[in-house]
C-alpha cells in the first residue's frame, strides 16, 4: 500500500480520500450512494436466506382491491398438492387476508404496517423469523395495496408481479410508470367483468406497459371463472424452473428494480443535473 | 409517504460521514432525484425538516438536483429526452430502449463544517 499509485484507496476510506480541500472550514465529500442503500443491503441479506433454502419469492403489487388475495386463493387451490407455498401478507390493519390464506391450508404471516404504505426489506426480515423457509418452494409477499411506494423497495424477492384489474382503467401503466416499469409480469385481473365495461381495453393496457420500455409478458385472468389461470400457473412453473437452474450456476434471480442512471449506466459527468431548489430548509 | 423512511436512511448515511470526518456540523446535503425514482422532492424536503432535528445535520441545507429522463435506442442508437411515462425512441418510436438517466435516488455529496 502506498500513497502514490492509489492502491491505498478502498471502498471504506474512499469518502475520506475524495473529500475536497476545505474552503472556509467547509469540506465537501463526494458520496454517490443510493439513498436506499440500507434497505438494499437488508434486501440482499434476505435474498441470500431465500437462495440458501431454494425458495422463489414473488412480490405481488397492485392497488387495493384488484384481487391479489383472490389470485393467491385460486393459485393455492391449484398448486398446494404439488408445490409447498407460504404467504407474507402486508396490510395497514386487520388479519383478514392472512385468515383467508390460512383457510386454504398454507402458512401465512401478517405484517400490519400501521400507517406505512409499503413493505420494506427490514419488515420482511422480521417476518422471516416467524416462518419456516426450509420446507418451501414458493413464497408470495402480498404487498400493501398501493401503486406508488412499494415499487421503490427491494424486499430481497426474485420477481415483481403487478396486477391491474379491469375496473381500474387501461391507462394505469401511464399514470404509475415507476410501478409498472418494475413489473416482471403484468396480470390483468377480473376479466369476467369485461362484458360490463366499455372503457377497458387489455391491448391498450399492454401498449401502455410497452411504452415504458417494458416487454414483460401480460396475462389476462379471472379468479372467479378461472379463465387465464392456466397461463399464470405455467408462468410460475417456468419461473421456479429458471430460478433453480440459476441457483445451480451459483447465480440468483433479481426483480426489475431501480438502477440509478447516474451510478450505473450513464457515463459519469455526462448527465446534466438541474437544481430543484436551493433555498434553505426550515431550521 | 415513504419519503420519511427514505430520509431516515439518508440521515444515517450523512451522520456516519460526518462522524468519519469529525465534523462539527453539516452545511449542506446534495441529492439527485430522477422523475422515475418514485420520490417527490417536496415531500422529501418536509420529511427531512422533521427528521434532522437534534442531529449533526440540524442546520443543513438540502439541495435537490434532477436530471432529464433520457433513453438510448437499442435499435437505431438515437439518444432521446422523453416523458417519464413514454420511454420510446424519439426517432424510430421503438420501445427497445435503455434508460440513461432519470431514475436516480442518490446521495451525491455532503458539505461538512470541520473547522477546529
Image (spheres, rainbow, N blue to C red):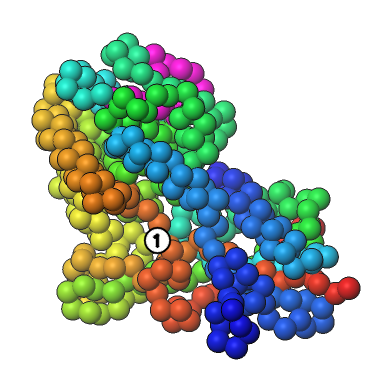
Q: Residue at x 64, y 49 (%)?
A: B8
Measured as percent of width and height from the top left, residue A107 is found at 36, 18
Q: Chain of mark 1?
A: A
* Image quadrant where one finds the C terminus of chain A: bottom right
Q: Is residue A244 left or right of residue A283?
A: left
* Image quadrant where one finds the N terminus of chain A: bottom right
Q: Nearer the viewer, residue B49 or A128?
A: A128
Q: Residue at x 22, y 33 (%)?
A: A189
Measured as percent of width and height from the top left, residue A225 is found at 14, 21
Q: Residue at x 88, y 73 (%)?
A: B116
* B3 to B92, vertically: above or below: above
Q: Nearer the viewer, residue A154 or B2?
A: A154
Mark 1: give few (<14), some (14-19) or many (20+) Cα within 10 Å. Answer: some
Question: Magenta segment: does it hold A86?
Answer: yes
Number of callouts: 1
Q: Nearer the viewer, residue A135 or B56?
A: A135
Question: Magenta segment: does it hold A48?
Answer: no
Disc 1 marks which residue? A259
Q: Secondary structure at mark 1?
A: loop
Q: Is residue A161 left or right of residue B65?
A: left
Work out whether residue A217 can be spotted: yes
- Which residues lie in the magenta part? A85-100
Measured as percent of width and height from the top left, residue A218 is found at 18, 44
Amino acid at each position: 500500500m502506498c500513497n502514490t499509485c492509489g492502491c491505498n484507496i478502498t471502498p471504506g476510506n474512499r469518502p475520506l480520500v475524495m473529500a475536497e480541500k476545505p474552503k472556509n472550514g467547509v469540506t465537501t465529500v463526494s458520496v454517490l450512494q443510493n439513498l436506499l442503500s440500507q434497505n438494499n443491503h437488508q434486501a440482499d441479506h434476505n435474498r441470500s436466506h431465500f437462495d440458501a433454502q431454494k425458495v422463489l419469492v414473488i412480490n405481488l403489487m397492485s392497488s387495493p382491491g384488484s384481487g391479489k388475495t383472490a389470485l393467491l386463493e385460486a393459485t393455492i387451490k391449484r398448486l398446494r398438492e404439488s408445490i409447498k407455498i407460504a404467504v407474507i401478507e402486508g396490510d395497514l390493519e386487520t388479519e383478514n387476508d392472512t385468515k383467508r390464506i390460512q383457510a386454504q391450508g398454507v402458512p401465512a404471516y401478517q405484517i400490519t404496517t400501521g400507517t406505512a404504505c409499503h413493505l420494506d426489506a427490514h419488515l420482511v426480515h422480521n417476518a422471516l423469523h416467524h416462518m419456516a423457509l426450509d420446507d418451501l418452494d414458493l413464497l408470495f409477499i402480498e404487498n400493501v395495496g398501493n401503486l406508488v411506494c412499494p415499487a421503490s423497495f427491494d424486499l430481497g424477492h426474485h420477481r415483481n408481479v403487478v396486477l391491474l384489474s379491469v375496473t381500474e382503467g387501461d391507462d394505469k401503466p401511464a399514470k404509475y410508470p415507476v410501478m409498472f416499469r418494475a413489473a416482471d409480469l403484468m396480470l390483468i385481473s377480473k376479466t369476467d367483468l369485461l362484458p360490463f365495461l366499455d372503457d377497458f381495453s387489455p391491448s391498450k393496457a399492454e401498449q401502455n406497459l410497452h411504452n415504458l420500455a417494458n416487454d414483460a409478458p401480460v396475462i389476462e385472468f379471472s379468479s372467479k371463472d378461472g379463465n387465464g389461470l392456466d397461463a399464470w400457473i405455467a408462468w410460475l412453473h417456468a419461473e421456479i424452473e429458471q430460478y433453480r437452474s440459476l441457483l445451480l450456476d451459483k447465480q440468483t434471480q433479481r426483480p426489475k428494480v431501480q438502477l440509478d442512471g447516474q451510478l450505473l449506466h450513464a457515463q459519469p459527468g455526462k448527465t446534466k443535473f438541474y437544481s430543484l431548489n436551493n433555498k434553505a430548509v426550515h431550521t | 409517504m415513504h419519503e420519511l423512511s427514505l430520509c431516515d436512511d439518508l440521515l444515517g448515511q450523512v451522520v456516519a460521514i460526518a462522524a468519519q470526518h469529525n465534523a462539527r456540523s453539516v452545511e449542506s446535503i446534495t441529492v439527485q432525484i430522477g422523475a422515475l425514482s418514485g420520490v417527490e422532492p417536496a415531500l422529501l424536503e418536509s420529511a427531512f425538516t422533521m427528521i434532522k432535528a437534534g442531529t449533526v445535520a440540524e442546520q443543513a441545507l438540502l439541495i435537490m438536483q434532477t436530471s432529464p429522463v433520457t433513453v438510448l435506442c437499442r435499435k437505431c442508437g438515437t439518444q432521446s429526452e422523453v416523458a417519464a411515462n413514454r420511454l420510446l425512441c424519439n426517432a424510430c418510436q421503438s420501445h427497445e430502449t435503455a434508460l440513461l438517466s432519470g431514475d436516480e435516488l442518490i446521495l451525491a455529496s455532503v458539505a461538512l463544517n470541520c473547522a477546529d
